Every structure is written in structure tokens, then in C-alpha cells.
Image: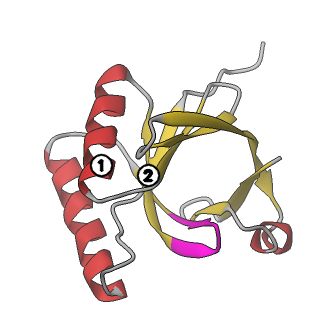
Amino acid sequence: MRNQEKPIIIFSVNESSLSDSTNRDRHEAYALSFKSIGLQFKSLLGCYKGDCEESFLVIDTPENRAFVTEIARRHNQQSILFADENRIAELLYLNINSRQPVGKLIPAAKAHALEQDNWTFDPETEIFYTTV
């Protein structure tokens, strides 16, 4: 029997109107805040529609979903990525509260991932992910 993956949420606190330095500081401040409240997370690097930024991965629970959605709205995020236990992914567009399926989140070779408009990189495992 194959182990089931846990559902996940990937989101960012970056804002395009801020400098890279300010966004980096904000990401680090949230990471410290998450640690202080005991929220388990991973820092990732992601690219969405060609814009690259640091992001977070947390386990998708009802509590985390509400918490992350509030943070993302506060920082004017366009969308949040949710992936279920089978890594079937969808984007929640916050401004219109609409979901859009985006495919299956899978590991990808670096060269292939970097050719895509959308990818995620986990620096701990050095694995790139994209959707198909």
C-alpha cells in the first residue's frame, strides 16, 4: 500500500510593489512568526506567471486554510495553490473567490521546470515541481 501524501497549501507574502529586500525581510519575519506559534512549514522558491518569489508550504487543514487565506488577502496575493493527497492542484483566486484546476503537481527536471511559467523549488530536497 502506497503512503498517502498530506494535502498542502503553497502561498507567498511578497508584494510586487515592494523591493526584493523588503519582501525577503517580510518572508523571514513570517517564518519566525510561524515558528513561534508552532506552525510547521517549509520555505520554497516559486515562479508564477514568470514572477519568481519566496513562498511557504504548509499542511492543508481547515485551520491552516483559514489562516493562510487571511495572510494572503492581507498581502494582496492573486492566488493560493492547494494540492490534495494525490497532488491534484488548484488555484484559489482570492479577488473573485474562484477555483481553477491546474493539473497534477509532480517532480520535474530542473531544465524542464525552468522552461515553464510556473514551478516550485524545494531547497531542502533540491527538487523542482511543476504541474501537468
Position of 57 relative to 28 (above/below): above
The amino acid type of the residue labelled 2 equals Phe
21 or 93: nearer the viewer: 93
The secondary structure type at the circle numbered 1 is helix
111 or 91: nearer the viewer: 91
Q: What stretch is highlighted in magenta?
A: 45-52
Position of 113 relative to 106 (above/below): below
Q: Does the magenta stretch include residue 47?
A: yes
Mark 2 or mark 1, which is nearer the start of the sequence? Answer: 2
Task: State the image quarter where residue 97 is shown.
Answer: top left
Q: Where is residue 117 in the image (x, y as percent from the top left)?
A: 72, 68
Q: Residue 73 carries which label?
A: 1
- The kind of secondary structure the magenta stretch mainly shows is strand
Q: In this view, does 125 lie to the left or right of 45?
A: right
The amino acid type of the residue labelled 1 equals Arg
Residue that badge 2 annotates: 11
Q: Position of residue 11 (x, y in %)?
A: 44, 52
In the rendered image, the residue lying farthest to the front is 96
Question: Which residue is at a point 38% across and 47% down the rendered structure image?
Answer: 41
65 or 2: nearer the viewer: 65
Q: Count neighbours of disc 2 (C-alpha within 10 A) and say few if under 14, some if 14 to 19, many if 20 or more.
A: many
The secondary structure type at the circle numbered 2 is strand
Q: Where is residue 66 in the image (x, y as percent from the top left)?
A: 30, 30
Question: Which residue is at a point 19% across and 66% down the rendered structure image?
Answer: 29
